[in-house]
């Protein structure tokens, strides 16, 4: 039956993006064969090169075609010859908004054998998830200039929060906390002491939705305190739910705690029926490493595990996660680019072998 086929669009993107995406695809194909999952893959060449050649970031019919894929695997966005912001906005943020991917899921897990900058912390201490709202806040693009370029210039950048927007994210986070079934603790991270309108809406909504989940312990941190706590007591966290901008910032902090950008992955998820979700390593395009085989594909492979999990193939997802941990724990020397003890493709092969 065609509905049993897992269709995945692959956007390798810029720099080392295609290389790490290829390793993700390699592992996806292998685990699919082992688990009897039918996979159909299609490559799309969107990114900096195509933009420089054609002036087009996302062709008019691209969104329509991508909308037929429940999942997108994205390598990386960012080209040295394209001004910062153009591809990020025109490709990454555009897809997040167009497909209303309102959940940005960032698992923060210290794999065995991976070095964390936190002294004395082990994989038992660093294992939580950040659920970042992914469509509103300062990312909504609301704002403008007054008297631009004059000494009297005014610039406004407005944070937009809606009841619907925060409620659907908060509810999804409660569901995820329940399903994850670990500490069953959901921490709201915001700044209610200063953002007394927008984050008051988040706070009230969090309290309302919490009533539907009496089995989940609720907790609140101001974002600044969360940054301290995440470094001092990362083991306290189970699931964090937060706004788009704060989520962007704290997930970089969290990413370094789990061993850096070579291992951190994210999912941009539209959980609604027929939704198109997009999974990505957080590492960026690292142009100077392009084609050198030095970049770490673990994050991209971990993005594939998330893709499988969200597509309902939990067993396959677990298998990939276990294989990743075998490889980080028993094979790789480091997670840093060029120091892994293996090439990009060899790390992909090792994960396949460990499946
Ligand atoms: C991320 C990135 C993006 C963001 C950038 C590239 C627009 O930092 O996915 O966290 O700010 O969301
Ligand atoms: Mn970010």
Image (cartoon, rainbow, N blue to C red):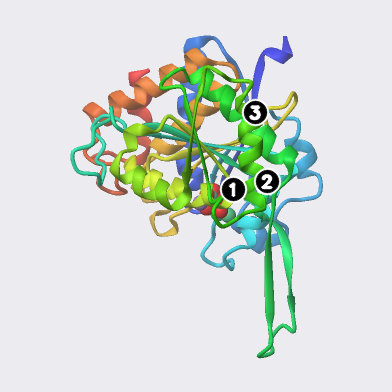
Asked whether disc 1 touches disc 3, contact meaning CB atoms under 8 Å apart, the reply is no
Question: Residue 321, image x and y in percent?
Answer: 40, 23
Quarter where residue 262 is shown: top left
* Disc 2 target residue: 135
Considering depth in this image, is 7 or 71 the residue closer to the camera? 71
Left or right: residue 93 compared with residue 177? right
* Disc 1 target residue: 244
Quarter where residue 328 is shown: top left
Image point 56% across, 18% down: which residue?
214
Question: Residue 21, image x and y in percent?
Answer: 50, 38
Q: Return the mark for residue 267.
A: none
Q: Is 272 placed above or below 295 here?
A: above
Q: CA distance from mark 1 to mark 3?
A: 19 Å
Badge 2, how many Cα within 10 Å: few under 14, some, many 20+? many
Image point 64% across, 47% down: which residue?
200
Question: Residue 252, image x and y in percent?
Answer: 43, 49
User: Looking at the image, is mark 1 or mark 3 nearer the viewer?
Assistant: 3
Considering depth in this image, is 241 or 208 the residue closer to the camera? 208
* Disc 3 target residue: 209
Asked whether disc 1 touches disc 2, contact meaning CB atoms under 8 Å apart, the reply is yes
Q: CA distance from mark 2 to mark 3?
A: 20 Å
User: Looking at the image, is mark 2 or mark 3 nearer the viewer?
Assistant: 3
In primary-sequence order, the first of circles 1 and 3 is 3
Q: Quadrant of the N terminus?
A: top right
Image point 42% across, 20% down: which residue?
182
In primary-sequence order, the first of circles 2 and 3 is 2
Question: Residue 228, image x and y in percent?
Answer: 35, 49
Q: Is 352 placed above or below 261 here?
A: above
Q: Is 60 placed above or below 83 here?
A: above
Q: CA distance from mark 1 to mark 2?
A: 7 Å
Ligand 1 within 8 Å, label 1 CB = yes
């Amino acid at each position: 039956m065609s509905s049993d086929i897992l269709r995945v669009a692959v956007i390798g993107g810029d720099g080392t993006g295609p290389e790490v995406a290829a390793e993700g695809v390699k592992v996806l194909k292998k685990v699919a064969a082992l688990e009897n999952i039918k996979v159909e893959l299609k490559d799309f060449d969107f990114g900096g090169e195509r933009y420089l050649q054609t002036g087009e970031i996302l062709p008019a019919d691209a969104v329509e075609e991508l909308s037929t894929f429940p999942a997108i695997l994205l390598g990386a966005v960012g080209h040295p010859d394209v001004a910062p912001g153009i591809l990020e906005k025109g490709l990454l943020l555009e897809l997040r908004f167009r497909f209303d991917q309102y959940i940005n899921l960032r698992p923060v897990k210290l794999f065995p054998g991976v070095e964390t900058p936190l002294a004395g912390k082990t994989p038992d201490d660093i294992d939580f998830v950040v659920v970042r709202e992914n469509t509103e806040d300062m990312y909504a693009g609301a704002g403008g200039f007054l008297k631009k370029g004059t000494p009297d210039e005014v610039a406004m950048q407005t944070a937009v929060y809606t009841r619907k927007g925060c409620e659907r994210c908060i509810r999804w986070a409660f569901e995820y906390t329940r399903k994850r079934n670990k500490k069953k603790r959901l921490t709201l991270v915001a700044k209610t002491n200063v953002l007394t309108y927008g984050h008051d809406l988040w706070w009230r909504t969090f309290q309302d939705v919490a009533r539907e989940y009496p089995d989940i312990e609720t907790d609140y941190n101001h974002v600044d305190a969360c940054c301290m706590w995440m470094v001092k007591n990362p083991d306290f966290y189970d699931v964090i739910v937060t706004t788009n901008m704060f989520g962007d910032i704290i997930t970089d902090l969290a990413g370094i705690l789990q061993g850096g950008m070579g291992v951190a992955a994210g999912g941009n998820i539209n959980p609604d029926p027929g939704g198109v979700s997009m999974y990505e390593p957080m590492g960026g395009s690292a142009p100077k490493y392009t084609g050198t085989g030095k970049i770490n594909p673990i994050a991209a492979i971990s993005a594939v595990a998330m893709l499988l999990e969200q597509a309902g193939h939990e067993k396959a997802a677990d298998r990939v996660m276990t294989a990743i941990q075998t490889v980080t724990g028993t094979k790789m020397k480091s997670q840093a680019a060029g120091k892994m003890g293996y090439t990009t493709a060899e790390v992909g092969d090792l994960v396949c072998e460990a499946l």
